[in-house]
Image: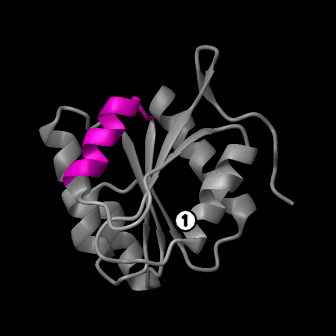
Amino acid sequence: MVNSASAPSFGSNPTRVLVAKPGLDGHDRGAKIVARTLRDAGFEVIYTGIRQKVEDIVATALQEDVAVIGLSILSGAHIALTARVIEGLRAADAGDIAVVVGGTIPQADVPKLSALGAAAVFPTGTSLDDLVTGVRQVVAKTEV
């Protein structure tokens, strides 16, 4: 059962999270489940759909004033795509937007993603409760 306690918020507004599917991966069932789970947990979620360009993800994050970008990646390109999103945010002077990554992530790649600047990594098999808790922890760290 997903913890439905209210999400951290900036002021009186719920925390905004962008869920994006970068690259050519066309499988979005998991991303839709994540988006709905975060919404049900009290976050305001913007879902971009499949096959998003990194530049478009960054632009949408800026336009929507999100606190967190959640990348859902099943294609195996998680390291390159995460690096490009983080670089794009930094270039746009938006390095304070946290990036979390989920999907088909080998355990050996988790430290690599963290070293790139990913605030959290949620490999396949992460429970929805752990996902919500992890995103809340990321948001709490950005509010400090």
Residue corresponding to mark 1? 31
Give the residue at x 23% y 43%. 89
Q: Main secondary structure of the magenta part?
A: helix
Q: Is residue 82 above or below residue 68?
A: below
Bounds of the magenta segment: 55-66
| Image location of residue 79, percent across then percent down | 27, 72
Secondary element under disc 1, as helix, strand or loop, is helix
Q: Nearer the viewer, residue 23 or 123?
A: 23
Residue 96 seen by the camera? no
Q: Nearer the viewer, residue 46 or 96?
A: 46
Magenta includes 60?
yes
Q: Point out the residue furthest to the left here.
A: 91
Q: Residues within 10 Å of mark 1 (few under 14, many from 20)?
A: many
Magenta includes 24?
no
Q: Is residue 119 above or below residue 12?
A: below
Residue 113 lies left or right of residue 31; in this view the side is left
